[in-house]
Amino acid sequence: MIELEIQGLSPSREGLLIEVGRFVMANGFTLQRQRLVQDPHGILLTMVVRGPSRGRKALEAALGAYERFISFQMFPYVEGEPKPHFAMSLPRAAYTPPPAPPTVAPASSVTPPAAPSTNTPAKAAEAVAASTPVDASESPQAPPAEPEFEFIQPTPRPSAPPPTAVVATPFVELVPLGPDEPAVEKMLSTLERDYPKIVPQLLLLQQSVAEAARASSLALAGKRTGSWVFQSEYLLDDGLDLRDAIERLGVPALHALVEVDQEGSQLHIHDSPLCTDGHSGCSFFGGFLEGLLGPAIAPGSMSIFPVCCRSYGADECVLAISD
C-alpha cells in the first residue's frame, strides 16, 4: 500500500470533489483527506489517497485525461511534510504609484507696452482733431471692453490606491490525535434521554476538543451511538449482506439525524449540520454506520470513507461503503 498526494488546478469547484473521488475509488484507492482552496488562478484541490502501488499509473492516467483539470501533479505523500500547492499564487509586492505632476500656475494677463510715438503728418492731424471740442452726442460710442478669460487648471486626479496582495491559504496538515474520551463520555451521558435530537451535543463536542482530535472524537461518538441504536432497535436484524444492511438499517437510522439518500453502496447526506466552515463532521456518520452495520452484516470486513464533504465546497457529503 502507498499514500499519494494529488494536487490539481480547476477553473470551477462545483462537483469537483465527487468526480475526482470517483476516479480514486475506481482505481482501488481510498480517500484519506481532501481540501479545496480559492486562488486567483482557480480552485486548488489537494487530496491524500491510499491504495495499491500497482494502481498508481492507472490513477495518474485517469486524472491526466480529466477535462476539468487545467493541470495536476501526483507524488508520494510523506506524513508531517506538507507540500505547498504547485499552482498557489505567490504574494505580490504592493504597487507604489508615481508622484503626481507639479501644478502649473495660471497664466496672468500682461498689458503690452505702448508703442513709441512717431512725428508724422497723420499723427499731427490726429492730435489737432483730438484738441478740437466735439459735441458728445455726435461722438461715436467706444466699443465695450472684451472680458478677460481666466484659465482654469484641471484638478489633478487622485492617485489609485495600491492593489491588495492576494495570499492563498496554505495547505497545513495537522498531526491527528486520538479521541478525547472524557469529552465523548460526557456527550453520551444523555444519549438515552436526548436521542435522536443529539446534534446540539455533537456541535458542542466539536467545539470542546482540540482541532487535531476532532475527527477521532466524532468517530468514537458515532461508533458508540450506532452500537447503542443497533442494540435498541435492530438487535434481531443480523446475518445481512452489506447492501441489505445499508438499505434496511443504515438509511432509516440516519434519517433520524439528517436527510440522506442511497445510491448503491453510497450514502448522500444533504445539509449536514456537522460539516460547515471547513470542519468536516463526516467521521461521526462513518463511525455511526460502523457501529450500526458491523453487528448486522455477515462475517467480513467493512470499509467506510468519505468521498466528498460539503465543508470543503461539495454540494453534499458522500460516504462510500464497501466490504
Image: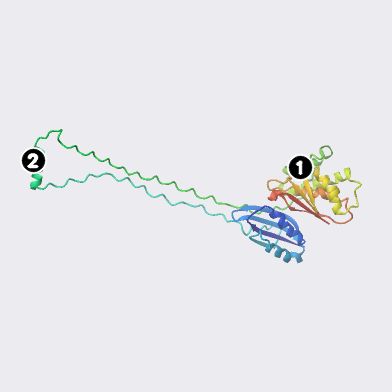
* Residues tagged 1 and 2 counted as in contact (Cβ below 8 A): no
Picture residue at 74% right of the left edge, 50% below the top: 317
Q: 209 and 139: which one is in front?
A: 139
Please tell me whether mark 1 sits on a helix, a strand or a loop: helix
Marker count (numbered): 2
Side (left or right) of 69 relative to 246: left
Is residue 84 shown above or below 257?
below
Residue 202, label in figure:
1
Q: Residue at x 70, y 65 (%)?
A: 61
Q: Residue furthest right?
A: 236
Mark 1 burial class by Cα count in 10 Å: few <14, some 14-19, many 20+: many
Q: CA distance from mark 1 to mark 2?
A: 116 Å
> Closer to the observer: label 1 or label 2?
2
Q: Earlier in the sequence, mark 1 or mark 2?
A: 2
Q: Position of residue 78 (x, y in %)?
A: 70, 60
Identify the residue at image location x=84%, y=50%.
Answer: 247
The answer to whether any part of residue 222 appears in the image is yes
Location of the C terminus by quadrant is: bottom right
Q: Which mark is residue 312?
A: none
Q: Is label 2 in a helix, a strand or a loop?
A: helix
User: What is the three-letter code of the residue carrying label 1?
Assistant: Leu
Left or right side of 83 for 141 = left
Q: Nearer the viewer, residue 250 or 225?
A: 250
Quadrant in the picture for the N terminus: bottom right
Crowd class of label 2 (few under 14; some 14 to 19; many from 20; radius 10 Å): few
Which residue does the numbered mark 2 point to in the structure image? 128
The amino acid marked with disc number 2 is: Val
Residue 18 percent across, percent down from the top left: 72, 54
The image shows residue 31 at horizontal and vertical percentages of: 74, 56
Percent position of residue 264, x then y: 81, 54
